[in-house]
Image (tube, rainbow, N blue to C red):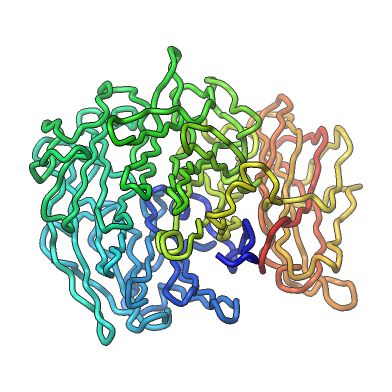
């Protein structure tokens, strides 16, 4: 890498992302970001409103162009994303620099398209079938892997949780035309035995060896806590034959009952495994797995590093979150990277709070994206972005890593599932799904040769810095039944030096209502300013903060990016509104309206 390559850089995506579910940031996005042979950057995301967007950033000019996939003839990806975190979208630039995009499927017929021309996102060719037949009727978790010789391998599940098989296909392209698909093999058989194999990230290493890690789940116990056992298999001949890490032959398709490939024998329940975490391979061809496992007598679910040292599998605990075994208090599924200079790096995040009763996430890890250098058994844990992604997980751009030595990933913030009504909703920071309908997103790039500076905490990091705030005095009674400006609260006018930057808003407050059935709502209103200092009619509402209890409660929204104002080169007037609906009144026992700016090593 050039000496002028920054250690770390964050590039905001154009527009706002939808964060009501996890489709923009799941461990089984492979990948969310890709880089072509000329250094052009591509990303795919679900935008505010649920449309699927593909973006290209020119390496030469540094400008973004985008396309809404619903405008493509026949809408190959569908008109809107299905509100389901399994409906991720994957993207890769193949060896000829044609862009492949596939996703928005959870047990559905194949949705796949390829750019008609290399490095062009304006014209697309729909792929209605790879090899066709019943093996593409219920597709989920499609993953791309680029072989060093240019052939593209595709891993996916056909079927459902507790009743699924996995397959490996191959695509061979050409310079002048879109290429063809062939079936390599059926990798695992789960349907026959009412179970399925969940894959970790699938990897083709520097030598062209394919590496796969599976965990299993039976239909009789469909909970995530029923994930059990880890199996590892590799192929040095593009999928023709498969062996264990020690060289023993594995009969294919893989069966759970054939323990030849088993590397970790766990209990059938409460193993701690959350399916589909990380895998990479070091320069010596040794696999390294990032996985969550139960440890301790309580027990506790933590990130672990499981790796082959040439003789045996070594299991090392990486995190110490003390959160028990609950779903909402878990660490997000980890990614792992093996760099060309021999480092092994684990990437994970954890929520800023723990909604359950199992415990509290330690402050050092809360609300940040993190990297742990586990090379040679060390545990150097450091943040890489001081941003709260809540349930966001990280996946790595495989071409940027292998071809350019860059660790590149999409970062965003996302909620759980829009339809959930569990205690997950009942926690400080996350009180209304509308707060997730328009969220931030960007691409973080780390120079793999300079990660030591991150471990030593010598590098500025992306964060949101408060630049202005206004507050409500204690015990302000709200009786208005329609949203109106909160009396006595000074508005915030964004300063001119913030033009061209991404600004955010957050509301934190204490409130209660006088009677059951009443809802007190706090909300911001932002109006864009004209050249004379007045509003020009362009504005937005957001950041809803509801209170329904008769006892005072403390609540806060997440940081929410503005879609207008400074990011479009204009100033903005931001005010706090409130209303009490349902027959009673509301009392605000103190509230703060904040405006913040995306700060740190940011490129616009």
Residue situated in front as seen by the camera: 3 or 42: 3
Q: Position of residue 304 (x, y in %)?
A: 42, 31
Q: Is residue 404 above or below residue 357?
A: below
The image quadrant where one finds the C terminus is bottom right
**Number of numbered tags placed on the structure image:** 0
Q: Is residue 534 left or right of residue 52?
A: right
Residue 468 vs 323, above or below: the answer is: below
Residue 126 on image: x %, y %: 27, 75
Residue at x 59%, y 78% (from the top left corner):
63
Would you place residue 442 above or below residue 377 in this image? Answer: below
Identified at 34% across, 70% down, the residue is 100
Q: Quadrant of residue 82?
A: bottom left
Give the side of residue 440 with respect to residue 338, left or right.
right
Instruction: State the residue at coordinates (79%, 74%).
Output: 536
- Residue 227 place in picture, x, y as percent: 29, 31
Residue 395 rendering spot, x and y as whole percentages: 44, 52
Farthest residue, direction top: 297
* Viewer-nearest residue: 488 or 573: 573
Q: Is residue 186 left or right of residue 394?
A: left
Q: Is residue 165 above or below residue 220?
A: below
The residue located at (20%, 37%) in the rendering is 246
Give 586 or 4, whichever is nearer the viewer: 4
Q: Quadrant of the N terminus?
A: bottom right
């Amino acid at each position: 890498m050039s000496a002028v390559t920054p250690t770390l850089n964050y590039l905001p995506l154009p527009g706002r992302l939808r964060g009501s579910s996890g489709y923009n940031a799941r461990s089984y996005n492979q990948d969310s970001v890709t880089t072509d042979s000329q250094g052009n950057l591509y990303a795919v995301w679900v935008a505010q409103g649920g449309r699927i967007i593909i973006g290209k950033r020119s390496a030469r000019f540094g400008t973004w162009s985008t396309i809404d996939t619903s405008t493509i003839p026949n809408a190959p990806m569908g008109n809107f994303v299905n509100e389901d975190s399994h409906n991720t979208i994957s993207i890769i630039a193949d060896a000829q620099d044609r862009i492949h995009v596939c996703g928005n499927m959870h047990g559905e017929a194949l949705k796949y398209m390829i750019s008609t021309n290399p490095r062009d996102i304006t014209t697309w060719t729909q792929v209605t079938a790879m090899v066709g037949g019943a093996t593409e009727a219920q597709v989920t978790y499609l993953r791309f892997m680029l072989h060093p010789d240019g052939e593209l391998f595709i891993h996916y599940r056909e079927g459902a949780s507790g009743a699924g098989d996995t397959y490996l296909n191959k695509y061979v392209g050409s310079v002048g035309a879109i290429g063809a698909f062939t079936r390599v093999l059926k990798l695992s058989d789960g349907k026959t035995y009412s179970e399925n194999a969940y894959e970790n990230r699938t990897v083709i290493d520097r030598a062209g060896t394919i590496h796969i890690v599976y965990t299993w789940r039976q239909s009789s116990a469909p909970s995530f806590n029923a994930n059990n056992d880890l199996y590892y298999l590799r192929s040095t001949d593009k999928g023709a034959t498969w062996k264990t890490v020690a060289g023993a032959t594995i009969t294919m398709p893989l069966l759970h009952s054939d323990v030849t490939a088993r590397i970790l024998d766990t209990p059938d329940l409460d193993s701690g495994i959350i399916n589909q975490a990380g895998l990479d391979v070091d320069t010596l061809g040794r696999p390294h797995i990032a996985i969550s496992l139960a440890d301790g007598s309580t027990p506790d679910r933590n990130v672990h590093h499981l790796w082959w040292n040439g003789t045996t599998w070594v299991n090392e605990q990486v995190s110490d979150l003390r959160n028990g075994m609950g779903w909402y208090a878990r660490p997000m599924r980890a990614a792992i990277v093996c760099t060309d200079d021999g480092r092994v790096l684990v990437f994970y995040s954890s929520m800023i709070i723990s909604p359950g009763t199992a415990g509290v996430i330690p402050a050092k890890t809360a609300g940040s994206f993190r990297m742990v250098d586990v090379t040679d058994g060390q545990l150097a844990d450091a943040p890489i972005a001081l941003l709260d992604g809540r349930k966001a997980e990280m996946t790595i751009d495989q071409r940027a890593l292998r071809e350019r030595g860059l660790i590149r990933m999409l970062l965003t913030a996302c909620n759980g599932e829009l339809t959930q009504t569990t205690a997950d909703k009942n926690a400080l920071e996350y009180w209304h799904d509308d707060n997730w309908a328009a969220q931030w997103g960007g691409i973080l790039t780390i120079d793999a040769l300079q990660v030591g500076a991150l471990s030593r905490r010598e590098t500025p990091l992306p964060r949101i810095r408060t630049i202005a705030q206004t507050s409500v005095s204690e015990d302000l009674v709200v009786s208005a039944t329609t949203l109106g400006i909160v009396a006595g609260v000074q508005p915030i006018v964004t300063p001119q030096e913030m033009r061209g930057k991404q600004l955010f808003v957050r509301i934190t407050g204490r409130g209660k209502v006088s009677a059951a059935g009443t809802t007190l709502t706090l909300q911001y209103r932002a109006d864009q300013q004209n050249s004379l200092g007045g509003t020009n009619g362009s504005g937005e509402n957001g950041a809803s903060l509801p209170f329904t209890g008769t006892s005072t409660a403390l609540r806060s929204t997440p940081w929410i990016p503005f879609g207008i104002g400074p990011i479009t080169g204009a100033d903005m007037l931001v005010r706090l509104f409130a209303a009490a609906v349902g027959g009673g009144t509301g009392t605000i026992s103190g509230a703060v309206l904040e405006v913040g700016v995306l700060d740190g090593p940011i490129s616009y």
